[in-house]
Amino acid sequence: MKHFLNTQDWSRAELDAVLDEAAASKASKFGQQMAGKSIALVFFNPSLRTRTSFEIGATQMGGHAVVLAPGKDAWPIEFDLGTVMDGDTEEHIAEVAKVLSRYVDLIGVRAFPKFVDWSVDRQDKVLAGFAKYATVPVINLETITHPCQELAHALALRERFGKDLRGRKYVLTWTYHPKALNTAVANSALTIATRLGMDVTLLCPNEQYLLDERYMGWAQQNVAESGGSLQVSHDIDAAYRDADVVYAKSWGALPFFGNWADEKPMRDEYKHFIVDERKMALTRDGGKGLFSHCLPLRRNVKATDGVMDSPNCIAIDEAENRLHVQKAVMARLLRG
């Protein structure tokens, strides 16, 4: 049995096959790959694109999706072993995952960090608990990584540049947000861009905004295996210059994890990291570099209206591709 927890767990050949299947699904939306099959979508956090695309995707393949929100329309769940459950949690993941596995053929899990202690959150206990106890494949709907977003992003880049992305200059840029956010999409963007052999620049205000060593390590490993390169920059203009792709994301500085009030004065100094027309004009061929974001995006905070409404913005294409890549993932997992 195979799970889809991180793209790093799958071979490059497997990822390419999923992307090929997603492209075919995009050309022909309806099928019977999930006929008689079902998926439980367990949401500990809100969702727009993820919930909609998985529910519709299952339907388009002849299957059925059931959505559960623990603590709302399902019982609160305990994830630690040895806990005396005399508090708010009503049942243990050991039973939850096993019972769901008797009902459905796939389980999807969305669970953001608690934002208290990164050493705890980086263990990804919710996702790991489902993967440990489930007897059907588990799909990561976003925890501390977002592999479904990675594939949607990769498919959007393939559609513009072709399958071979080696040699393309890729900039993953930090952007300002009034709140400190999860590093999941940034972790995933760094992972997939280096996996695809691109020349990757991680642009952030200072070293305190570097990503966790696990994901920096994955990126370095990917460069060694797939070619391409990886560099860290704090120079905005140098990073943007001649870029083929600019991918924006906000995230909190890990040294301040769980203590965002102390980070905020520093973060407020970097509002100029917004993606705007001046910066995008530095990209390839006099400003024809692509821009994207995972969405949701606060306009004129993360990126300007002009950037979002440009023909070079592929954020909507990427969002649509969530539907197609997730269908391909579900179909592949069901085939074993």
Image (tube, rainbow, N blue to C red):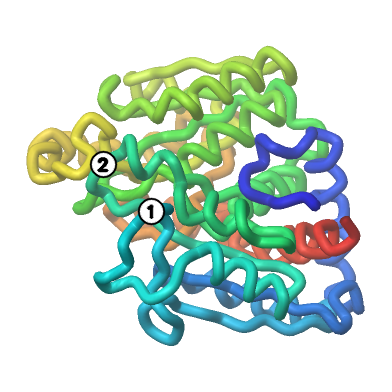
Q: Nearer the viewer, residue 35 or 150?
A: 35
Badge 2 or badge 1: first in the primary sequence = 1
The residue that disc 2 covers is: 117
- The quarter holding residue 130 reads bottom right
* Residue 299, x across and y down, in percent: 33, 59
The residue that disc 1 covers is: 82
Quick one: label 1, few (<14), some, or many (20+) residues within 10 Å?
Answer: few
Lateral position of residue 151 relative to residue 295, left or right = right
- Mark 2: which secondary structure? loop
* Residue 286, x across and y down, in percent: 54, 31
At a point 45% along the width and 26% down the height, the residue shown is: 202
Q: Which tag is nearer the camera, tag 2 or tag 1?
A: 1
- Is any part of residue 311 visible from this angle? no
Q: Is residue 28 above or below residue 198?
A: below
At a point 62% along the width and 48% down the height, the residue shown is: 5
- Please report contact status of discs 2 and 1: CB closer than 8 Å, yes or no: no
The label number, if any, that marks residue 23 in the structure image: none
- Mark 1: which secondary structure? loop
Q: Is residue 253 above or below residue 86?
A: above
- Is any part of residue 203 visible from this angle? yes
Lateral position of residue 193 relative to residue 161, left or right = left
* Residue 57, x across and y down, in percent: 73, 74
